[in-house]
Image (cartoon, coloured by chain):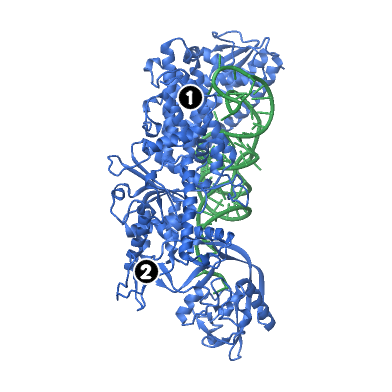
Amino acid sequence: MVRSELSKSYDPSGVEQRWYLTWVDRGYFRAVPESDRKPFCIALPPPNITGALHMGHAFQQTLQDVLIRRRRMQGFETLWLPGTDHAGIGTQVVVQRELRAEGIDPRDLGREKFVERVWAWKEQYGGRILEQMKALGNSFDWGRLRFTMDEDLSRAVRVAFVRMYGEGLIYRGERIINWCPTDQTSLSDSEVEHEDVEGELVTFRYMLSDGSGHIDVATTRVETMLGDVGVAVHPEDERYRSLVRKTVRHPFDGRDLPIVADAAVDPEFGTGAVKVTPAHDRTDFEIAERTGLPRLNILNADATLSDEVPEEFRGLDRYQARKRVLERLRELGFVVKEERPYPHAVGRCYRCGSEIEPWLSGKQWFVAVDRLKGPARQVVEDGRIRFTPERWARVYLEWLDRLRDWNISRQLWWGHRIPVWYCPNGHEFAAVEDPDSCAECGDTGIEQDPDVLDTWFSSQLWPYSTLGWPEQTKDLAFFYPTSVLVTGYEILYLWVARMIMSAMFLVGEIPFRDVVIHGLVRDRRGRKMSKSLGNVIDPLDMIERYGTDALRFALARMAGPEQQNLPLAEEAIGAGRHFANKIWNAARLVLSSDVRPELPADEHRTLADRWLLSRHELCRSEVDAALEEYRFADVAQSLHRFLWSEFCDWGLEMAKNRLRSEDDQDRTAAGGTLAWILERTLRLLHPIMPFLTEEVWQRFGIGESIVVAEWPSAVPEHRDEEAEREFSFVEDFVGAVRRFRSDHVLDPKVPLTARVQASKAHEEILGSFSEEIQRLAGLETLEFVSDGFDPSGSARLAVQGAEVLVPLAGVLDSLTECVRIRGRLSGIDEDAERSRRKLDNDGFVKKAPSDVVEGERRKLAELEGQRLALEAQLAELGCE
RNA sequence: GGGCGCUUAGCUCAGCGGGAGAGCGCCGCCCUUACAAGGCGGAAGUGGAAGGUUCGACUCCUUCAGCGCCCACCA
């Protein structure tokens, strides 16, 4: 037992770093696959190396650390694997921006030098992220730190690619992709964000080539008419049947565009005729495929108009072209209608926000998803993978149903280069190791595909590539499948779904059992935190000012399972610090008794002890149940309520006297009980507030570290309903006297006397804590009187059927008490009236369960009793 | 165009078919030897709206409104 000299308030600075280093040094966070324990493993969703950690990371990592720390204490072989993601486009863009700021054009630098430069960035910012994660207290196994571009992870990417290529799941083809003209790369469908805009819908007229009439079409992107190669109508549309196979004449270049029939056209919409622009619209592309129309690509990579258009439009950017084409159509008198504003959705790049062009960019690589869908659907349907909250499972399944082939090639330099080579003889082959010559003809003039893979292609391998896949490592055998994935809903499709699909195909086993989907951290008004709004709360800043534990507690406390938005205000973190300080001071008091955390024998336990043990056991069971279901807010809430409102407010107050007692046995019993409960509660709280709990726990001198202390087990026999019921009399008694004093705004120095008429049992309860109760209620005298004691001249307080008489002489005027009594009476009358109405209702008495009816009757009887007593008091006090 | 979530105290949110809760904020009293980052007491809500089911609805059902989000090849 360490005699403690604790400072008056908790100061997290210093404490945190010291303990973190100690924990890492002692290897508490290291996991080994040669263990007899059961495995528990979480793969950290790897943060991007693009910048610093934000509050969303802090939040998500806190939840994971809570799960990990508890499992570790429960005796699992616990692995939390840290890492970072190279974040293809994101990182390339920030490094390009940095270069341009230095006056360097990234293109001049060349691919190799550019990639070197990104690695330098990775060292700098990736390193900073690691430091931030340490400050959060995360119990990572640092020895297993991974980066998606590490050598072995890159090899995993190649093995995955080659295997899927070999099975025909990866193919190369020319189709419409999502093109970002700013970042100059294609994007997958999931990387396009849809935004509603107020655009325009222009209906214009194509004249039939033979001069026999016209056909009207509409578009929100009128410039694309330069790439029109035909007009499509529904095959069964009577209006246009005679026009099919005729042609219309393009007004600007005189081309004849065939009118074709295709079922994709909705005859109900607009004019029922659609312009067909195969190179710039997915549907049109498909119509062209079916009807044999050619493709006409009118855009350059930067979304300016190509040389395929008439000279007057060449080189214009798409928005200028939109205006110019419209003007020219107007001049020619071909504009039929202009609707403006016309609300519709446009796609935007999830990285830079530029408007996406559906574009034919040449050949791109795709993952065919049809064969991947089945198993990915199966494992969620049969419950092998479980979503929390459950409703996300449906969202996931519906997304799978709609999923189309995944474009995985990116026209970037930063990332895993596509492991496919081409030879001059037209051969194409994929290889895990860099080849010297063509696998088919041996020609040495081979060239690797210049594109890199979608960053999510490597991310999808994360749960198993980090454990050594494709090698059959011990780690993989022991820790895989991982136990839980904790992530935000915004990457459900981009990442979660793809991990499941790829794992089922490549590993043949689910990547994780539970998926915990949490909401997004917002500012206090529910807005996204962003630099431009100036509402960013920086986790490191908060840690500096309030301490890591305060931040973690605040984050855990707001993690309601169904919340999509999690508003965070700085005050919440301040409240976390208050809580830490409260615990610190409670510990100071308990530790001052200088006893071991041991429960005394039953016969030395007071009612208050039994009550507190019961409440503690309840708290323990709530914490366990909530953690099993990932209800983090409930965990925090439960611990907060117990420690503050029960342990401190009542437990400590009821034990203070004995804690200072000269009697060794009394002191040991009281202090031992409090210490025992506090020590266990610290262990329950440790996953959320690791530093404070360690700092305090150490002073009990009972073990090496709370990090590896045992998770508190259930002690069902401590639940004690009798103690809770009996102790509630103490709470009510103290509360009644306090309220009396407060109602009359009495100075605390005014001495009060209480004379109690109560049952033997109640008398005994009060008697055994008379000193404590006097102190808490602010009574100078507490005495028991027999039935029939003259109550005149006293206020009468009703406490659970007992009567408490407070003599008014020298305290306050009787009339003042009358006012108070009348106030109470009106409240009672209201309640009694409502109760009476209920019982007068035949339906209620007949149909409601008998215990409910009985309860209502008891309640009414009690209210009546109180009313009579109060009326008697009014009479005694001579009130009118 | 489909789908989902939310709407409860001034703020942020729990909860739930039978007497409306927490934290913060607010008001009053108190520097009582663990803690003023504290203690004690208090005020405060026609539970988004309208219907329905029920003896009884904040809770279940329907409709509507507002806010937010996801998905979608209607030009």
* Camera sees residue A400: yes
Residue that appears at 61% across and 72% down: A317
Three-letter residue code for mark 2: Val
Instruction: Left or right? Give the position of B35 relative to A683.
Output: right
Q: What shade has chain A been given?
A: blue
* Image location of residue A732, percent across then percent down: 54, 21
* Image location of residue A771, percent across then percent down: 52, 12
Residue that appears at 35% across and 54% down: A465
The mark found on residue A420 in the picture is 2
Work out whether A664 lies above or below A331.
Answer: above
Label 2: element kind: strand
* Image location of residue A346, percent across then percent down: 57, 65
Which quarter of the image is occupied by the N terminus of chain A?
Answer: top left
The CA distance from mark 2 to mark 1 is: 64 Å
The mark found on residue A587 in the picture is 1
* Image location of residue B22, percent across then percent down: 56, 33
- In front here: A696 or A27? A27
- The label nearer to you, 2 versus 1, is 2
Instruction: Left or right? Give the position of A660 relative to A435.
Output: right
Work out whether A687 lies above or below A417.
Answer: above
Q: Chain of mark 1?
A: A
Label 1: element kind: helix
Characterize the local packing of mark 2: few (<14), some (14-19) or many (20 or more) Cα atoms within 10 angstroms.
Answer: many
Residue that appears at 42% across and 55% down: A496
Q: Which chain is green?
A: B
Work out whether A498 lies above or below B42.
Answer: below
* Camera sees residue A848: no
